[in-house]
Image (spheres, coloured by chain):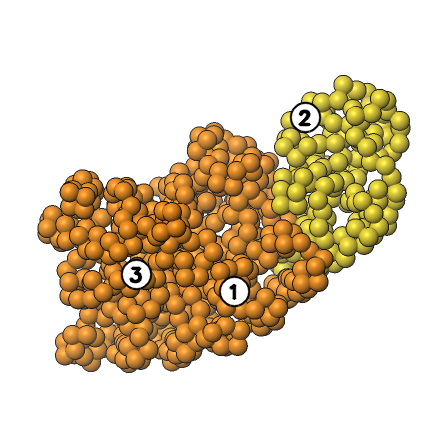
Chain colours: A yellow, B orange
């Protein structure tokens, strides 16, 4: 699996969901689900995998203490994880990697980045090439999101 | 009107480039049909019965004459010389070729227009009062707020893949000409007891197969809080709206299933967390946009005695004045409805030549601005009283002066089975037959205001559920049948029509409408409107008359 980062760089990693495995293996890109029994003493290298219907503010555990957070797109037309990412970044102040998994099209790349995703899990280098092409679709935006601190109406006033 | 700056132009240009790439990838086979569909829909492109249909955004129904001329130009170059104005104040072209759509969009971008979010499960074109800024009964011009919403909602990264489409309407008059209570969100600018202006917020209205009248979830919202409150509603909807069944995915179902009170609590809780962030507008942010909508350089005019004399002399002109011309904020000016309801044409259709001639009139007898209405007409917003006869003559020559505004023949209709792949039944032919049965204008005037609205399927693009008379096309074993509802309204007295009874066959629909209207004429008290007669007596007498 290729992990494409927002700056275009890539790493190869095995992103696995624990709970389907026997033990924590300590590989950096392993994640556990919110109902995993070991959630409270998961090693610092383990990430948190959140289905897109959970409220990130109502978790029993603090999501920001995880090495990374995985948010999922079961279909690219299901946009719930965009809201989760923004709340994680902008409200809970999470600064670690937010990883997008699932159906990711290059046409979403700008939206994903602007909502706070900075890592994209893709099957191969070709898929990573394709998604990366979408990073530059838009060079500006109206809204303030995690990647732009000021909305257009504030930037205009600043001149 | 609003003028693009570098930010607006860059966004629109980059969207054209992105869409060109998406279309090329699709044509090369790199995007599947399923992947391309949501992408093209977010840019207003449908694949229809005969050809693609492209829907172009006309933000809150305001067009410059330069833009209207460009639309005429596009109609000739890319289509068959005409376009169709819709119930969302937009324009549809029914015959463009898929390969040429990116070029067409680039032409639009050259006049500060686009097709962004005119379809798809995202925030659609914000609609408003067609008389905004010139209405004599408005509290304030709602267009600056619409423009602020347009910018906030355009390519909003979080809300591009909602459970379902999302429509916002804004009005600032007591008379609701924007149908705000049948929108996902309706904002009504009001003055509170302390004399402060703000919005009453309605949520969860909508038409389609489950028509619902929106509920007020906040009595008063400061204008500076408008965007944070909208964002809170959208976030709650994006998280909790149903995605398991597309027919239950609109926000109206979430509001109904959770209860409006509980829904409002969720919104308020979310809002409390974002209210004071960068979404909170400053007064300066609002006044900056308001500056684009300042009144034009009106002359000091009084009404013209010559126009009055012409009205006395010519009953046709007089009829038109009475029906299609209304009061203006500014003395000596009038607001003119350009009727796209010629009995021989499909409601809302407009040829390239008509567009150009209307643009000419708006320049000659106005300030270069034209409006579109959700009732599928055009508006010349600033016609001097002394020029009314000249404008009328020019419009009459073009078939645009049918003096029927608000009458039964000023009907709303979707394109129906003739163009739309969703439709179950035709609407254009039915519209013609009904028009034939009410060809006597004097009779129409006697009948007074009757809002007839017709949809070719239960998606309800023709707003049938809120027609005083609603007609819905249904499919019965491959045949076109029609269901009738009475007593609906999309205005400040918003109500859903009640079903009259079993659906009627294609051949019977126009005569049945005739029977309903005859019954009304018998039962009516004085000058009572059709809507009020139905309200007073219920639908039983009409049911009796139709079904015996």
Q: CA distance from mark 3 to mark 2?
A: 56 Å
Helix, strand or loop status at disc 2: loop
Residue B366 placement: quadrant: bottom left
Residue B422, relative to residue B300: is it above or below?
Answer: above
- Residue at image coords 30%, 61%: B431
Q: Pointer 1 indicates a residue of which chain?
A: B
- Residue at image coords 50%, 68%: B95
Q: Which residue is mark 1?
A: B51
Residue B437, relative to residue B481: is it above or below?
Answer: below
Q: Which residue is mark 2?
A: A59
- Residue at image coords 53%, 63%: B52
Q: Pointer 2 indicates a residue of which chain?
A: A
Q: CA distance from mark 1 to mark 3?
A: 23 Å
Helix, strand or loop status at disc 1: loop
- Name the mark on residue B431: 3
Q: Nearer the viewer, mark 1 or mark 2?
A: 1
Query: Position of B72 compared to A55: left or right?
Result: left
Closer-to-camera residue (B146/B480): B480
- Residue at image coords 53%, 69%: B96
Closer-to-camera residue (B335/B178): B178
Q: Pointer 3 indicates a residue of which chain?
A: B
Answer with mark 1 or mark 3, whichever residue precedes in sequence: 1
């Amino acid at each position: 699996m290729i992990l494409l980062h927002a700056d275009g760089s890539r790493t190869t990693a095995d992103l696995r969901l624990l709970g389907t495995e026997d033990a924590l293996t300590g590989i950096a890109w392993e994640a556990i689900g919110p109902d995993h029994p070991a959630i409270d003493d998961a090693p610092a290298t383990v990430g948190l995998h959140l289905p897109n219907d959970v409220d990130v503010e109502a978790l029993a555990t603090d999501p920001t203490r995880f090495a990374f957070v995985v948010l999922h797109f079961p279909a690219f037309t299901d946009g719930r994880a965009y809201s989760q990412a923004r709340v994680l970044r902008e409200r809970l102040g999470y600064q670690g990697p937010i990883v997008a998994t699932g159906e990711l099209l290059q046409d979403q790349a700008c939206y994903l980045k602007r909502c706070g995703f900075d890592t994209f899990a893709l099957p191969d280098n070709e898929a990573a090439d394709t998604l990366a092409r979408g990073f530059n679709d838009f060079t500006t935006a109206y809204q303030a999101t995690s990647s732009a601190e000021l909305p257009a109406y504030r930037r205009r006033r600043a001149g | 009107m609003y003028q693009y700056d570098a930010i607006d132009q860059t966004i629109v240009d980059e969207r054209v480039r992105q869409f060109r790439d998406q279309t090329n990838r699709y044509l090369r086979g790199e995007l599947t049909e399923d992947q391309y569909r949501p992408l093209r829909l977010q840019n207003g492109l449908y694949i229809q019965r005969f050809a693609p249909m492209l829907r172009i955004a006309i933000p809150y129904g305001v067009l410059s004459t330069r833009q209207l001329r460009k639309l005429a130009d596009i109609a000739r170059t890319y289509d068959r010389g005409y376009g169709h104005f819709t119930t969302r104040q937009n324009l549809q072209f029914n015959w463009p070729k898929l390969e040429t759509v990116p070029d067409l969009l680039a032409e639009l971008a050259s006049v500060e227009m686009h097709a962004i979010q005119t379809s798809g499960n995202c925030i659609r074109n914000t609609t408003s009062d067609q008389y905004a800024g010139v209405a004599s009964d408005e509290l304030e011009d709602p267009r600056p707020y619409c423009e602020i919403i347009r910018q906030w909602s355009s390519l909003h990264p979080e809300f591009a893949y909602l459970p379902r489409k999302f429509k916002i309407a804004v009005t600032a008059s007591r008379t609701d000409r924007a149908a705000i209570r049948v929108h996902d969100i309706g904002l009504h600018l009001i003055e509170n007891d302390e004399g402060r202006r703000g919005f009453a917020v309605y949520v969860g209205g909508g038409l389609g197969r489950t028509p619902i009248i929106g509920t007020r979830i906040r009595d008063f919202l400061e204008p500076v809080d408008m965007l944070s409150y909208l964002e809170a509603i959208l976030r709650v909807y994006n998280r909790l709206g149903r995605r398991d069944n597309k027919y239950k995915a609109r926000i109206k179902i979430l509001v109904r299933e959770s209860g409006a009170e509980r829904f409002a609590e969720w919104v308020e809780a979310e809002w409390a967390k974002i209210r004071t962030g960068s979404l909170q507008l400053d007064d300066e942010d609002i006044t900056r946009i308001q500056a684009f909508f300042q009144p034009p350089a009106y002359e000091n005019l009084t009404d013209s005695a010559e126009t009055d004399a012409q009205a006395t002399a010519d009953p046709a002109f007089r009829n038109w004045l009475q029906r299609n011309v209304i009061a203006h904020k500014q003395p000596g000016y009038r607001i003119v409805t350009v009727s796209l309801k010629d009995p021989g044409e499909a409601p809302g259709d407009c040829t390239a030549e008509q567009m150009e001639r209307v643009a000419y009139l708006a320049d000659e007898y106005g300030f270069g601005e034209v409006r579109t209405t959700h009732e599928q007409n055009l508006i010349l917003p600033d016609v001097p009283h002394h020029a009314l006869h000249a404008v009328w003559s020019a419009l009459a020559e073009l078939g645009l002066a049918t003096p029927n505004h608000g009458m039964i023949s000023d009907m709303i209709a979707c394109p129906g089975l003739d163009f739309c792949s969703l439709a179950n039944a035709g609407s254009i032919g039915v519209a013609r037959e009904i028009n034939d049965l009410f060809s006597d204008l004097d009779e129409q005037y006697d009948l007074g205001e009757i809002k007839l609205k017709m949809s070719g399927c239960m998606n309800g693009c023709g707003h049938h559920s809120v027609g005083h008379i609603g007609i819905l096309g249904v499919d019965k074993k491959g045949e076109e049948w029609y269901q009738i509802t009475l007593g609906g309204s999309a205005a400040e007295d918003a109500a859903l029509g009640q079903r009259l009874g079993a659906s009627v066959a294609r051949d019977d629909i126009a005569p049945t409408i005739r029977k309903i209207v005859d019954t009304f004429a018998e039962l009516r008290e004085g000058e009572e409107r059709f809507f009020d007669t139905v309200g007073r007596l219920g639908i039983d007498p009409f049911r009796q008359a139709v079904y015996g």
